[in-house]
Image (spheres, coloured by chain):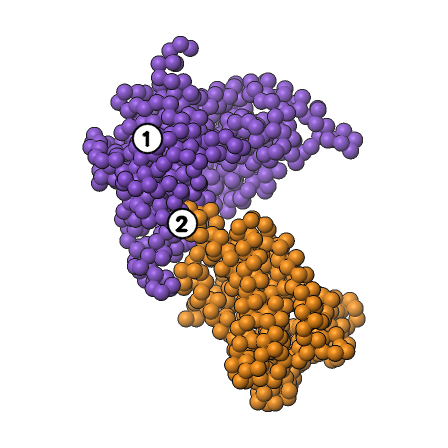
Chain colours: A orange, B purple
């Protein structure tokens, strides 16, 4: 057992991210030193912010949930050889779905929330599947379509909210009915009002689903085959176009669910923003750092979520601007994406180890 | 030492005790050899014997863990291909590294463009290319684009590329694998001219015939070690093969005469479109009976790929019919064709035959993963999968460290065994094998041929498409010659020979060749 755990960390796939994280944090510290800040105090207040109170811990979890989900959305597409940068649009479609069901329908509490989640998830999924369909049938690059679909989704949401679900005098939609809320009231109270919702549980289920679907089922097998070598998959008789559409649907569902969580569990409305949330792009970072595996995405989502939330503490505790943490995350992703540079750092180390053997 | 009779100045390249280890394997184990100036030195070995690793070290792509390299008597450290080029070492890769839409000259100067002020001096460069082409009689048009010239010409471009960079030592990596018989003899002439001009050549190959024909010395490598360096004049193919494989080899594939039965696969007036509106397959008709191997001979690009893709459902057909056991399978999906009893060993095993990043067991189930024995309500039965893989690895003697090994890390021969195991285990009625021994060594070729013949003997219909005359003559019972998408003639191995067949492959009908 002990050996197995060691093996996981010995593999290059885990070594590179871990080293990247360390280098990223060190570089962040150096920049703070140059700026005349105290990095130890800064990182200390970052950690203190996350674990400081039950409210903060709950809110940190709330930050982590959408990052993990977005990470899964990007990762599953990656594994099929697709680059879904349209998660933002799928989030919007998911939140629109949740908003429509949440404001327009009247159902008993549990059922209402469930209907809103399912409708939002499916709407996000279809939005993703549409990108997949255009790719599979017409060969149009998914990077281009998915980013364009982000804008279509954004302005579609503005149109629908303004015309059908407006809150008079504000730049946001009407509130969802209380019966559609997925907040966990008792836990929220216990945690000082932190916005804890059932999406947390759904995210854990999604991580497990991702692992099983990809590694144990025939659909996951097809997905990986298509991702590694679509030609061979086609020669073996697999329907590559079907796999692409199916994968983009699941990817879109993950994104759509994020949207439903934000509407049903956190804000209760959609604000009319001029830009998309950007969560989908954070998802790319999470997937990359997590190596597109279930456990990896979960861990990297937790790290990036914790850093993001904890950065607020840095500005309070050490007077360090929170943007530093965005830089640290940027460094980490940079080094993960350029593993050759990381290997340079520990080449002398491995050489020494080799000589000992 | 053997080298004592030669003076130092005669040695163009010397390797001393080169050792290279990869996790789990010793790819090169203390390899030493000398390349004399002006000789053609063949490097013979099976796939995975360590030839490519060794040449990658010489060309600066890998660093040896131990050992020394001497160029012209000077000890050198080759830490990048650029360094190798500076030292006058050039490599003609097996897979050409050319930019298709660029002209010959543009490809040759790529990376070291001669400048005239701010502009690239294309005219000067093309004159230089032309001069090199004339000097070695390579007959290359400097202004032609790569996509418009033949594979043989593309290879010559690669040769000029190394000469243009001032190479004195040329490494040829399996240079004849992609060539037609005529192109091969032309290439051998070119190599002779290069040597006559004072160049030294290392020829990586496992084709004994070529070694016998052109090489002066042959170093045999087996499992990362040098077996022996021999003078080619003092040896014979049988001896070389035995040294390479480490046991006695049978060249002539032994088989009983075929006992053909009813027609299993029939192709009628097949027309398949290629690119650019031309018909790649242009009115083909033939049939394959149970218990016979029909060989399709022909030079690459005469409709073989399109024919196979049409039969296996990968490409839709324009007109005609494909009939399997009396039922039409025209324009069916690849899945339906495969389930209907046609197995296919694809020509390009890396692109079409395998998912290289999958393990052996994952590749074994590539087509049957959704069959009841492997699939339980959508979940893959891992136990059944691994049992199946372990059984096939045993039955087909796949050399691998385990069924969880990624196929990418295995040798070409063993990769091919995985494909053959998978395809034969489906128990097909018709087996289509396209270039099944491409890039394989003697031992693996023998294995593949035996498998094809054993399928025939079990009453299967086998369609063998190959560019290798020897293979067709050795294995097939009936030979169809494909030229320009049509069948130019039918013959049997007994009533023809490689010269006659070679002429037919070049488009001359039977009997026509005599007029030349």
Query: What's the chain of the residue with tag 1?
Result: B
Q: How many marks?
A: 2
Q: Residue at x 37, y 11 (%)?
A: B514
Dot in front, 1 or 2 = 1
The disc at residue B286 is 1
Q: Residue at x 34, y 53 (%)?
A: B368
For mark 1, does the 10 Å Cα neighbourhood hold few (<14), some (14 to 19), or many (20 or more) residues?
A: some
Is residue B448 something one can see in this rendering? no
The disc at residue B16 is none
Q: Is residue B490 above or below residue A183?
A: above
**Residue A134 rendering spot, x and y as whole percentages:** 56, 53
Viewer-side residue, B273 vs B40 = B273
**Residue B343 rendering spot, x and y as whole percentages:** 33, 44
Mark 2 residue element: loop
Query: What's the chain of the residue with tag 2?
Result: A
Q: Is residue A294 above or below residue B90?
A: below
Considering the image in quadrants, where does the N terminus of chain A appear? bottom left
CA distance separating discs 1 and 2: 25 Å
**Residue B259 rendering spot, x and y as whole percentages:** 20, 32
Where on the picture, by quarter, is residue A34? bottom right
Q: Is residue A344 above or below residue B492?
A: below
Q: Residue at x 49, y 73 (%)?
A: A205
Task: Say whether mark 2 and mark 1 are on the same chain.
Answer: no
Residue tagged by mark 2?
A237
**Residue A147 rendering spot, x and y as whole percentages:** 65, 58
Q: Is residue B451 above or below residue A296?
A: above
């Amino acid at each position: 057992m002990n050996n197995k755990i060691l093996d996981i960390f010995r593999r290059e796939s885990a070594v590179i991210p871990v080293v990247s994280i360390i280098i990223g944090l060190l570089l962040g510290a150096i920049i703070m030193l140059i700026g005349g800040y105290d990095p130890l105090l800064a990182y200390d207040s970052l950690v203190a912010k996350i674990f400081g109170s039950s409210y903060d811990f709950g809110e940190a979890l709330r930050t982590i949930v959408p990052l993990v989900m977005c990470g899964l959305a990007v990762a599953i597409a990656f594994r099929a050889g697709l680059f879904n940068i349209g998660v933002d649009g799928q989030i919007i479609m998911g939140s629109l779905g949740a908003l429509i069901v949440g404001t327009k329908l009247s159902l008993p509490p549990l059922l209402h929330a469930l209907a809103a989640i399912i409708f939002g998830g499916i709407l996000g999924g279809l939005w993703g599947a549409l990108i997949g369909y255009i790719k599979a049938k017409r060969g149009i690059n998914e990077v281009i379509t998915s980013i364009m679909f982000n804008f279509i989704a954004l302005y579609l949401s503005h149109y629908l909210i303004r015309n059908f679900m407006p809150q008079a005098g504000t730049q946001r939609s009407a509130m969802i009915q209380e019966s559609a809320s997925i907040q966990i009231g008792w836990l929220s109270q216990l945690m000082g009002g932190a916005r804890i919702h059932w999406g947390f549980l759904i995210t854990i289920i999604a991580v497990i689903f991702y692992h099983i679907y990809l590694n144990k089922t025939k659909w996951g097998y097809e997905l990986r085959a298509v991702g590694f070598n679509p030609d061979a998959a086609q020669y073996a008789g697999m329907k590559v176009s079907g796999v692409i559409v199916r994968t983009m649907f699941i990817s879109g569902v993950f994104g759509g669910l994020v949207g439903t969580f934000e509407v049903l569990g956190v804000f209760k409305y959609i604000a009319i923003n001029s830009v998309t949330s950007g969560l989908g792009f954070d998802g790319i970072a999470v997937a990359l750092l997590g190596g597109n595996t279930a456990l990896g995405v979960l861990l990297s989502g937790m790290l990036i979520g914790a850093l993001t939330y904890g950065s607020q503490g840095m500005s309070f505790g050490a007077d360090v601007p929170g943007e530093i943490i965005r830089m640290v995350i940027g460094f980490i992703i940079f080094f993960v994406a350029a593993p050759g540079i990381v290997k340079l750092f520990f080449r002398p180390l491995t050489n020494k180890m080799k000589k000992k053997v | 030492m053997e080298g004592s009779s030669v003076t130092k100045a005669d040695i163009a390249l010397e390797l001393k005790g080169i050792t290279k280890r990869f996790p789990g394997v010793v790819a090169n184990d203390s390899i030493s050899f000398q390349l004399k100036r002006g000789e053609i030195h063949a490097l013979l070995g099976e796939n995975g014997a360590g030839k490519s690793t060794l040449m990658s070290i010489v060309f600066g792509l890998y660093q040896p863990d131990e050992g020394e390299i001497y160029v012209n008597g000077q000890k050198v450290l080759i830490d990048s291909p650029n360094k190798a080029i500076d030292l006058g070492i050039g490599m003609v890769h097996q897979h050409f590294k050319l930019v298709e839409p660029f002209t010959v000259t543009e490809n040759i100067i790529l990376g070291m463009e001669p400048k005239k002020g701010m502009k690239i001096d294309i005219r000067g460069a093309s004159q230089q290319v032309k001069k090199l082409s004339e000097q070695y009689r390579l007959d290359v048009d400097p202004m032609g684009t790569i996509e418009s010239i033949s594979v043989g010409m593309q290879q010559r471009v690669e040769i000029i590329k190394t000469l243009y960079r001032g190479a004195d030592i040329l490494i040829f990596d399996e240079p004849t694998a992609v060539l037609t018989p005529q192109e091969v003899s032309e290439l051998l002439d070119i190599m002779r001219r290069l040597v006559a001009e004072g160049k030294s050549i290392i020829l990586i190959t496992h084709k004994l015939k070529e070694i016998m024909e052109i090489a002066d010395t042959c170093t045999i490598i087996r499992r990362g070690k040098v077996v022996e360096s021999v003078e080619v004049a003092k040896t014979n193919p049988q001896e070389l093969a035995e040294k390479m494989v480490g046991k006695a080899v049978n060249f002539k594939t032994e088989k009983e005469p075929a006992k053909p039965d009813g027609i299993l696969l029939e192709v009628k007036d097949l027309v398949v479109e290629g690119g650019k509106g031309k018909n790649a397959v242009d009115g083909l008709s033939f049939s394959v009976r149970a218990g016979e191997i029909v060989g399709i001979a022909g030079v690459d690009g005469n409709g073989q790929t399109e024919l196979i893709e049409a039969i296996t459902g990968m490409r839709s057909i324009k007109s005609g019919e494909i009939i399997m056991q009396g039922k039409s399978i025209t324009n069916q999906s690849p899945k339906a064709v495969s389930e209907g009893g046609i197995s296919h060993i694809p020509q390009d095993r890396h692109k079409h035959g395998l998912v290289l990043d999958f393990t052996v067991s994952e590749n074994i189930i590539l087509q049957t993963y959704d069959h009841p024995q492997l699939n339980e309500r959508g979940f893959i039965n891992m136990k059944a999968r691994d049992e199946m893989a372990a059984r096939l690895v045993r039955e087909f003697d796949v050399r691998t460290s385990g069924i969880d090994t990624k196929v990418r890390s295995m040798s070409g021969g063993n990769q091919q065994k995985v494909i053959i195991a998978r395809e034969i285990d489906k128990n097909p009625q018709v087996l289509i094998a396209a270039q099944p021994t491409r890039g394989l060594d003697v031992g693996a070729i023998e294995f593949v041929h035996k498998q094809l013949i054993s399928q025939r003997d079990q009453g299967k219909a086998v369609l063998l498409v190959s560019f290798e005359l020897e293979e067709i003559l050795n294995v097939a019972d009936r030979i169809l010659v494909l030229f320009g998408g049509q069948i130019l003639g039918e013959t049997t191995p007994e009533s023809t020979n490689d010269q006659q067949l070679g002429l037919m492959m070049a488009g001359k009908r039977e009997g026509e060749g005599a007029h030349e």
